[in-house]
């Protein structure tokens, strides 16, 4: 499935989408993967939509990916 990934509103997100798309196309079963950028997902608990930066769909899983543009060290206690 060929989808347009030129949908991000932030430069860092578009750069990440381009890299994800490039890396996925290098996979052996890349025709079994679908990348959906900038998706609105319905939250039925409060009847609202939440934006997901990327939804990645394969035959065996669905991943919702939130892209961040952070710098520095992240420490976990």
Image (tube, helix red, strand yellow):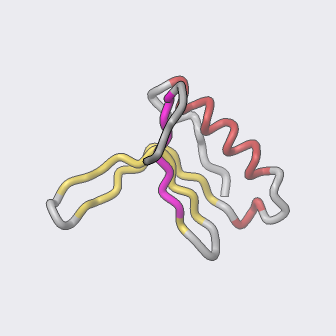
Per the picture, the main secondary structure of the magenta-coloured stretch is: loop
x, y percentage for residue 61? 58, 71
Residue lying at the far left of the rendered structure: 46
| Residue 7 lies in the magenta-colored region | no
| Residue 66 lies in the magenta-colored region | yes
Residue positioned 48% across, 56% down in the render: 64
Residue span colored magenta: 63-70
Is residue 67 toward the left or the right of residue 30 in the image? left
Is residue 61 toward the left or the right of residue 23 in the image? left
x, y percentage for residue 47? 16, 60
- State the quadrant of the N terminus: bottom right
Is residue 34 toward the left or the right of residue 73 in the image? right
Residue positioned 73% across, 52% down in the render: 24
Q: How many marks?
A: 0
Residue positioned 50% across, 51% down in the render: 65
x, y percentage for residue 50? 30, 50
Using the image, determine if residue 7 lies above or below residue 10.
below
x, y percentage for residue 77? 43, 48
């Amino acid at each position: 499935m060929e989808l347009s990934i030129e949908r991000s509103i932030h430069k860092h997100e578009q750069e990440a989408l381009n890299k994800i798309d490039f890396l996925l196309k290098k996979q052996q079963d890349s025709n079994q993967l679908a990348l959906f950028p900038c998706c609105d997902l319905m939250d039925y608990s409060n009847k609202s939509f939440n934006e997901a930066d990327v939804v990645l769909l394969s035959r065996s899983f669905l991943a919702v990916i939130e892209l961040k543009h952070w710098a520095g060290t992240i420490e976990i206690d």
